[in-house]
Amino acid sequence: MSSVGRHLPIAGLALAVLTSFGFGQSTPTHLQSLQSIVQDLEAHPEGHGPEGDGDLDASINAASIAEIRQEVPELVRLTESPNSQQRGNALLVLYGIAARQKAGLPENRRQLDVTAGETILPYISRIAPRFSDPSTQSIALVLFSNLAGVRPVSSELIKIALAVLQDPHSTQETLNPLKRSPFDKLPSIGPQMLWVLLPADATFYRNPVTDITEGRDSPEVQQAIVTFLRRPDQTAESLSESIRALAISQVENPVVNAELSRLLDSTNTVVQTAILSHMARLTLT
């Protein structure tokens, strides 16, 4: 499974989470159907079914859109399971569907199969609670990252992303409940959501001066980001990760960049280092 290039920081974190849930670790003995994979998830909440997972990517790629459309509601239901392992595994299969590539294209021209992602969009409000669940928030992020590649972007996706940004706990790191993951703590969810929100809402254009493709978010999203950066409960970790996301994205928001320039006066060395490290990437007035 691959993710859009600009979301690699999210994908890197999710890779460790994916491994911790157990997918991608076994040598497949046969190719399971998508229906069989979903049935195994239902029957075995704690992990693998009796015959292993098979090659998840290959199974998803082999499934027809009709098969995917049939199984997505059941997968969404399993994301609401009281068992955290089952919730995470169901999200991973949904991520595989959202990250599915169009068939028949060479490696250097790979594109998301947006038709597969569209089958999940009607259910994203039911998936949204997974962002407040430490055991699933990382994989929910990469799922939404791929769903943001479906154009036009769902207005509900933007609404959910803004709600996560405004959540009272979005600036705080959380203890990692996944014992097999190498991370003791999970990064604060607000800055991580910026990787999804920035390109999702942006209108992209070619800068005539630099000849570089850039984007600009709506005034509503720009103001929401400024409000997030100004929150009194901001931490050095949250601010430094926010600076990184804002600087590395292809999006140049004048209002947001002006707010970032104020952080040059920060007395926190972590924040100072982050803003100075990324200053060259920002277009400042």
Image (cartoon, grey):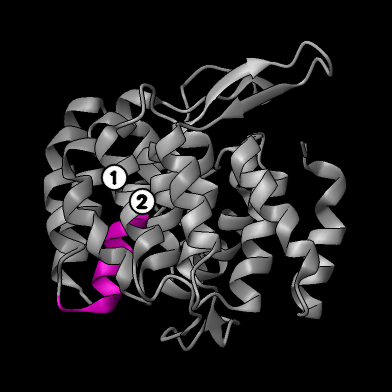
Q: Nearer the viewer, residue 68 or 204?
A: 204
Disc 1: which residue: 159
List x then y, in percent, for residue 93: 33, 52
Residue drawn at (59%, 46%) of the image: 7
- Badge 2 density bin: few <14, some 14–19, many ≥20, Cα 10 Å: many
Q: Is residue 139 left or right of residue 262?
A: left
Is residue 283 or residue 198 the one in the foreground?
A: 283
Quadrant of residue 39 in the image?
bottom left
Q: Is 211 within the magenta?
A: no
* Mark number displayed over residue 162: 2
In which quadrant will I find the C terminus? Answer: top right
- Is 77 placed left or right of 185 in the picture? left
Let me know if residue 52 appears in the view: no
Q: Amino acid at mark 1?
A: Lys
Query: In terms of depth relative to the viewer, which is nearer, 278 or 132?
Result: 278
Disc 2 residue type?
Answer: Leu
In the drawing, does residue 271 fall left or right of residue 119?
A: right
**Quarter of the image where one finds residue 257:** top right
Residue 33 spot, x, y in % from top left: 26, 44
Where residue 201 appears, as percent x and y from the top left, is: 44, 33
Q: Position of residue 85 (x, y in %)?
A: 29, 76
The residue stretch that appears in magenta: 82-92
As drawn, 18 above or below 146: below
Secondary structure of residue under mark 2? helix
Total labels: the figure holds 2
Tell me whether the residue at label 1 lies in contact with that at label 2, contact meaning CB atoms closer than 8 angstroms: yes
